Image: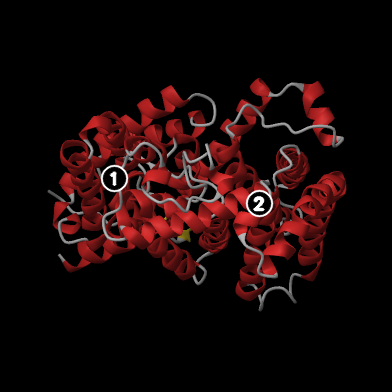
Amino acid sequence: MQSIEYLGALPQVAGGRDSVGQVGLRVQSVRLQRWAIGAVYAACFTAPITHSLSQLAWALMLVIAIIFVKRHWSYFGRSLLFWCVVFYCSYVLVRGGYAAWIESPSIAESHWYGVKQWIKSGPFIIMLFGVLLVATGDWIRHGLGVLIAWILGFLVFLSLNTSLEPLLNAMQGNSRFFFEIGYGSLTLISPVFALGVLVLVVWSTFWALRQRSRHQVFALLAVIASVFLLAVATVVLVAPKSRGSWVSFVIGCIVVLVFMCWVYRKELPLWWKESVLGLLFMVIFAGAAFYTSWGVVEARWSQESDTVAALAQGKHLEEMDRSSFTIRFAYMVYGFEQVKSRWLIGYGPAGMGAIGDYHGGWHNIDPDVPPQMTGRISNLHNSHLGALFRFGIIGYLPIMIVIGLATLEASRNLRLGSAQRVLGIFVLGFVAILMFWGMTEEFFEKFGVEQLYAPILGVIIASFLSRRLTSHSTVH
């Protein structure tokens, strides 16, 4: 079998790609490449619209990935990343079997359901997208393409599921509007969508202003599309009135702005007009978001200010009334205590609610359950603690290893070409949002969340795989 070079974004020469890129494309299986392109675009575009069609596309992606890995087993057989994913999937299956057959067979169905949810999440689905993007033959072009496809799919979803009157009431501060999306998923989708649109707008603005006399029509269309996307992103961020979404968005913006200023520190003085306009877009966007929602933001945060102050002064949690903040704080404190008691392998994939029911309530396991959690112990509202509770540190580490590797690869991309820089900056902002969101919600294994983090982190994992495959092909 002929080897293949995967060079990501290949250098351009007159008349198209360089000769190395052409050779790489010729020796690759064109049929497999086309199937990979079709499957990954279909999966991302349909994910926000219809889960069933998107999951069919994911199944097709799995078949293509198996074929691709088999053809390049000489690399994947020695890849620590690949075996980290295999270990994760194997451990979830073994841990679930042990819990279902030995530890608590009366809730075996809940354990097997947890296995089905978790085995396909995290490292597995991220690696799947990474492999498929490498199989397309041009990971950077199609990586950016599938992220844009997801945005387009999300816009279609909004157009089909948004009622104008409730939305206007929400924008006026009279109610909250969730766009027919589960609250836990929306708290991640809305800030990431807003951040992605903001990065796309700033990048397209730079491109449009530097076209001069070339492609002026396309430049004008890019600006018009940018204004439209900013308006939609503002609505998506503001209407749910989620404090977690606002904080996540601010964190992502800070990370993006810091890395953008660092990466382009030499170019900014030369592009001062473009820089001013790009900054103006960011200020207008942030100003519009805060102007339309500040009253609600202030009202919702003021409700918890006394609670936060009391906790800071040392008041015991048991002495405080139920509120959104005290309930989440109680989950965090109690969840941490339970994780410490079984930190190595956890309680099993069934989750906190089913485990508690198995023992007749958590008060039978631990009598010191905070009163704020009475009748509410179904999950921990914390994805980090949720994974540790189910699988212990053995199952949690592979997830963090894959996300950590994606973060390091994103940092490496900051030193490469223009598209890789922008992608790296966005992924670093996304990881910051994902880590913070994980401390407020426990939906990491749900499809509504997987459809977002899998392609974003998968693109940067494709960068890592393509670089290693190229090096491996050169050596062998």
- The residue at 78%/24% (across/down) is 166
SS for callout 1 = loop
- The residue at 79%/70% (across/down) is 272
On the image, numbered disc 2 is attached to which residue? 325
- The residue at 82%/58% (across/down) is 283
- Label 1 amino acid? Gly
Mark 2 neighbour class, 10 Å CA radius: few under 14, some 14 to 19, many 20 or more: some
Residue 37: quadrant of the picture: top left
Task: Using the image, determine if residue 273 lies above or below residue 451.
Answer: below
Marked residue nearer the N-terminal end (2 or 1): 2
Q: Which mark is residue 383?
A: none
Q: Position of residue 162 (x, y in %)?
A: 70, 24
- The residue at 64%/43% (across/down) is 190
- Label 2 amino acid? Phe
Q: CA distance from mark 2 to mark 1?
A: 28 Å
Q: Are the residues at dot 2 and dot 1 in contact (C-beta closer than 8 Å)? A: no
Side of 177 relative to 472 (left or right): right
Side of 54 relative to 72 (left or right): right
Mark 1 neighbour class, 10 Å CA radius: few under 14, some 14 to 19, many 20 or more: many
Picture quarter with the C terminus: bottom left
Task: Using the image, determine if residue 162 lies above or below residue 387.
Answer: above
**Closest to the observer, 283 or 293:** 293
Q: Which mark is residue 348?
A: 1
**Closest to the observer, 224 or 248:** 248
